[in-house]
Image (spheres, rainbow, N blue to C red):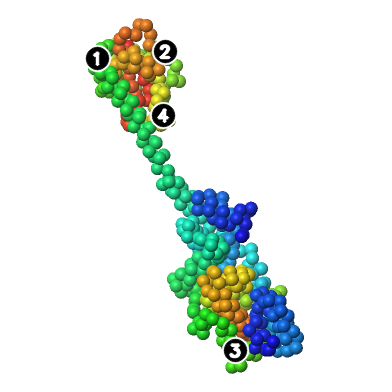
Amino acid sequence: MNCVQFQEIVHDLGRDAGLDQPVRRDALAHADSCPRCDELLAEAQSLTTALRSLAAKDGALGASERVEVTLIGAFREQHGSAVHSNRPWRWGLASVAGLAALVLLSVIVLRHPVVSPPTHGNGASATPSSASVAPESAAPAQQLDASVESAANANSNFADADTEYASAFVALPFNGETAPVGDEVVVRESLSPAALANLGLPVSETNAGENVLADFVVDEDGTPRAVRLVE
Amino acid sequence: MVRLSGHSEDDLVRRLLAGDEGAFVLVYRRWQAPIYRFALHMSGNTSVAEDVTQEVFMTLIREGGRYDPALGSLSGYLFGIARNHVRKRYDRDRFLVPFIENSTDDGHSNGHAGHNGNGMHPSIVVAPVDLGRGETIAMVRDAVLSLPGHYREVVVLCDLQEMSYEEAALVLECAVGTVRSRLHRARTLLTEKLSELQSSESKSAAGGMRQ
């Protein structure tokens, strides 16, 4: 190996990388015999040491925790939205459930013609009605959903307290997990014994052959949330 | 194949792209510091380094599907993104150390640039560096930052990140021979720069003693 060849690989030699063993051996032999090239090799090795010192000094550096927090937030946003877009059936399912509740309410309403509320007994009405609760109502207070009660009270200006007695409101089993929205209305209907049974309400021998008045608390989206019987 | 916490790199990337946050955190924690240091040594600016690190992983989150294991390692992919972002910052922020393309570099073996006519190294010899001094580290850092961008990046990748020529070639999208020749030239420039810095420091120290 001559000096020109040596100088072409002196930095590889100084870095101790990228050289085959025979080439490396020849280069070191040349450096041993040439003071000038030996000096260049020392220079390259010194530079390597200096650079490694810089790398070691900065070895513990990294991005701040803020960057990780930001990136994890971005990751969640990216994949959170991807999950929603990949599962449109969730929205579909919610829509179907809402539709089913509306259909059920419609069936109940259509099967039982409504009567005017003031003339209790045979009348039917689909308008917001009087819904006063008689003070002697015997049903357990805990059955009353607070929002349902407020809805009933909000409509109490229709009340004819001298002529009506009502049980406590009972939450309907098919109202789902939807929280009350706070804009409920009370709708009075006349129910057949079969409809009563469908709702899970008791059908006694005394009312087995005739329709019974019932007040429904209905969400603003049409979902019936509670029912009570009115006499 | 690099393995992180028992998972292959490819597996982690697949999981990451499928929305596995744990996989993302593993990849991030493995590579954020090297990426940050690459950007820091290239820019000399901690804010830029932090921004570039964030942008690299943001790109992985948004466009990670472009990563093809057949074309190279994940680290090569990430460093490649980091390099592009650093270059963009140079274009945007004039206060950064400029990323100048040196016209003497022809992309091929040209380790003789700066040598004298017979291809011999000029008579510049750097005295063994006193590494016990913090100023020396700072001097080396300044010398690296003073290099033209395409020389600086090979020094940062090969000497500071300790990548092989092949790995660096993948990041820089050039031939292995180009990496080798650029590194040779870059180290020659560094040697000259350090020699200048050391001699000027010696002169100022001598001046101080006379006073």
Q: Is residue A218 among the parts visible in the rendering?
A: no
- Secondary element under disc 2, as helix, strand or loop, is loop
- As drawn, is A86 to the left or to the right of A21? left
Tell me the chain of label 2: A
Give the distance between the C-alpha atoms of the residues marked 2 and 4, in whole angstroms. 26 Å
**Residue found at x 58% / y 61%:** B31
Q: Which quadrant would residue A172 be assigned to in this image? A: top left
- N-terminal-most mark, 2 or 4: 2
Mark 2 or 4, which is nearer the eye?
A: 4
Label 2 sits on residue? A138
Count residues near mark 3 (Cα–Cα under 10 Å), then give few for <14, some for 14-19, many for 20+. some
- Secondary element under disc 1, as helix, strand or loop, is loop
**Residue found at x 48% / y 68%:** B84
Q: Relative to residue B64, is residue B109 depicted above or below?
A: below
Outermost residue on the bottom side: it is B117
Whether labels 2 and 4 belong to a single chain: the reply is yes
Q: Relative to residue A149, is residue B199 depicted above or below?
A: below
Q: Which mark is residue B115?
A: 3
Mark 2 or 1, which is nearer the eye?
A: 1
User: Which kind of residue does numbered mark 2 sit on?
Assistant: Ala
Expressed as whole percent of the image width and height from the top left, the position of residue B64 reads 49, 58
Which one is in front, B176 or A190?
B176
Q: Which quadrant would residue A153 be assigned to in this image? A: top left
Q: Relative to residue A41, is residue B70 depicted above or below?
A: above
Which one is in front, B81 or B97?
B81
Q: Which mark is residue A176?
A: 4
Which one is in front, A70 or A162?
A70
Tell me the chain of label 3: B
**Residue found at x 36% / y 16%:** A196
- N-terminal-most mark, 2 or 1: 1
User: Which kind of residue does numbered mark 1 sit on?
Assistant: Gly
